[in-house]
Image (cartoon, rainbow, N blue to C red):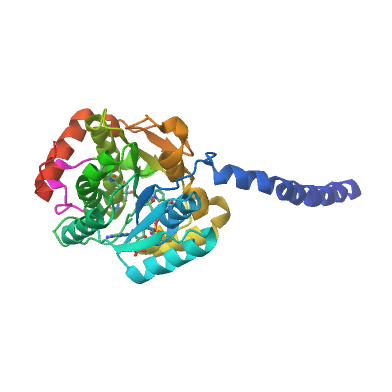
Amino acid sequence: MLAFLGSLLALSVTVPLLVFMAAPYIRKYIAGGVCKSTVKLNGKVAVITGGSTGIGKETAKDLARRGARIILACRDMAKGEAAACEIQTSTGNQQVIVKKLDLADTKSIREFAENFLKEENELHILINNAGVMMCPYSKTADGFEMHMGVNHLGHFLLTFLLLERLKQSAPARIVNVSSLAHHGGKIRFHDLQSEKSYNRTLAYCHSKLANILFTRELAKRLQGTGVTVNALHPGSVQTELTRHVPLVDIIWRKITFFLKTPQEGAQTSVYCAVAEELESVSGKYFSDCQPAYVSAQGRNEETAKQLWKVSCELLGIKWD
Ligand SMILES: NC(=O)c1ccc[n+]([C@@H]2O[C@H](COP(=O)([O-])OP(=O)(O)OC[C@H]3O[C@@H](n4cnc5c(N)ncnc54)[C@H](OP(=O)(O)O)[C@@H]3O)[C@@H](O)[C@H]2O)c1
Ligand SMILES: *[C@@H]1O[C@H](CO)[C@@H](O)[C@H](O)[C@H]1NC(C)=O
Ligand SMILES: *[C@@H]1O[C@H](CO)[C@@H](O)[C@H](O)[C@H]1NC(C)=O
């Protein structure tokens, strides 16, 4: 009996002690890949969509610290200005400016691009980061389902409008923030705007798959231009992305220890934007600063081609 109590006591001391000692290692594992590049970006210009918070803000901060001129493309100007202020203070880089961009409205996207092209002579890094997840069924100003409209079509149009400037500034890079969630996605050509059936989880997955297909198709089209495009999964990151799902939001707050911080979540975006070894790598998909596995759907060249064509039609643009 005494021996039993003794071992129980020993266990109750050693187990927590072991957990306590292992915690930093577990945390490091969860934090994931780190961008080790020390490249400076003085004289370079970077546009980051959705730079007002979360992964986008931390990505902007990192690039600002490297000396780049940063344009935060935000739909909420006040929130954007607050982020710009924070970035300026913490990096000492004053060249952080905010411009209005609502990806749920093609008029706003065109105005942003027009204004940008008038005021900036160069563009070296475009980070298509903004995104919505699992929002209730809603449509953009142009009648696109919100996930497809913002996550895919909005960035498609933005990239189209800025592409000439990227080419002129080559070497230049486009970075598309996709997600592991693309594995659950399908491109439903018969119901692209989910009017016949809507499932908000799947809608997010579809839009993130579209990101990957576009990255592949664009990479092909950009061969030889000095402009590369890659996609990535940032990891599971504590951000405002869960804002439309109260339950997930609550759980997310409870398991913070097991999630990446936004700064950790920004590492793969930064890696794709600056790493020397990716200079001529294009059309690839990364996670934790390493190449990662793309779903079969995401590798389908035919789907990529067709989605490209349909996207051009929906947006009324000619892109070939
Ligand atoms: N967090 C994760 O675990 C995770 C996992 C996989 C992939 N991702 C991807 O990572 C990217 C960044 O997400 P996050 O986690 O940092 O989420 P977040 O904190 O919610 O940030 C999303 C950003 O997108 C902006 N945005 C949303 N709708 C917009 C619109 N119509 N026009 C312009 N900007 C818009 C938001 O602006 P407001 O703040 O003004 O709304 C915000 O700045 C997304 O593409 C997401 O799919 C995240
Ligand atoms: C990413 O990639 C292409 C460029 O390849 C662009 O047209 C597409 O819409 C981009 N944006 C996102 C978020 O996928
Ligand atoms: C939406 O799709 C997910 C993933 O396939 C599934 O688990 C869920 O039950 C679906 N939700 C509804 C309301 O059909």
Residue at 38%, 58% in the rendered image: 51
Q: Position of residue 180 (x, y in %)?
A: 39, 42
Q: Is residue 138 above or below residue 39?
A: below
Is 289 on the left-hand or right-hand side of 17? Answer: left
> Looking at the image, which is closer to me, 142 or 64?
64
Specify start and end residues of the magenta stretch as a single range.
187-199
Q: Looking at this rendering, what residue extends furthest in the right direction?
A: 2
Q: Is residue 279 above or below residue 23?
A: above
Quarter where residue 232 is shown: top left
Q: Is residue 319 visible?
A: yes
Q: Position of residue 115 (x, y in %)?
A: 22, 59
Q: Is residue 10 magenta?
A: no
Quadrant location, the C terminus: top left
Magenta stretch: dominant secondary structure: loop
Quarter where residue 101 is shown: bottom left
> Looking at the image, which is closer to me, 318 or 249?
318
